[in-house]
Image (cartoon, rainbow, N blue to C red):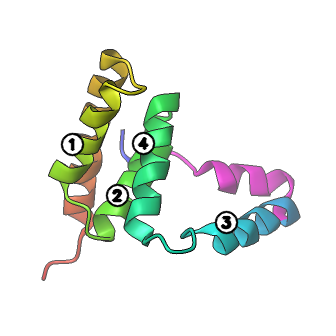
Amino acid sequence: MNTTDVKPSTARLAEVNPQAIARYKEMRALVMPAPGVDAATCETVLAMQLALRGHELPFKVHAMRAMAQSMSLAQLEGLLLAGVGVSLLACEAARALDWLREAHEEFTRSAPAG
């Protein structure tokens, strides 16, 4: 599934309470990226947390953001596999690897030619 196929959760929540989502986005801007940590690392950490929780579309969004910040597919795959020995079950890691490939394909299609 492509990330453009579904309305972002923040957009859906903003339909009910736009002020709350505005405050949420302000909070995110204050903590992202974390002090002393580059944006690519922060996006990668978020992506890995979302993979663990089984949230496909947000995982893909943050994986593509990490790719846009210079993380390679091989680096992201390696981090997913490193998680297998620490916290992810093999089936979760395999599922996330599939999502990562799909996100990479979408990212590559949407990247400006250059």
Instruction: From the top left corner, tell me how far across and down residue 71 is, in percent.
Output: 26, 62
Q: Magenta segment: does it hold 17?
A: yes
Q: Which segment did they paint magenta?
A: 5-18
Residue receiving disc 3: 28
Residue receiving disc 1: 78
For marks 3 and 1, give the one nearer the viewer: 1
- Which residue is at a point 81% across and 67% down the rendered structure image? 23
First in sequence: mark 3 vs mark 1: 3
Q: Nearer the viewer, residue 83 or 4?
A: 83
68 w.r.t. 15: above or below: below
> Amino acid type of disc 1?
Gly
Q: CA distance from mark 2 to mark 4?
A: 12 Å
Q: CA distance from mark 4 to mark 3?
A: 18 Å
Kind of element beneath mark 3: helix
> Amino acid type of disc 4?
Met
Kind of element beneath mark 4: helix
Callout 2 touching callout 4 (CB < 8 Å):
no
> Amino acid type of disc 3?
Arg
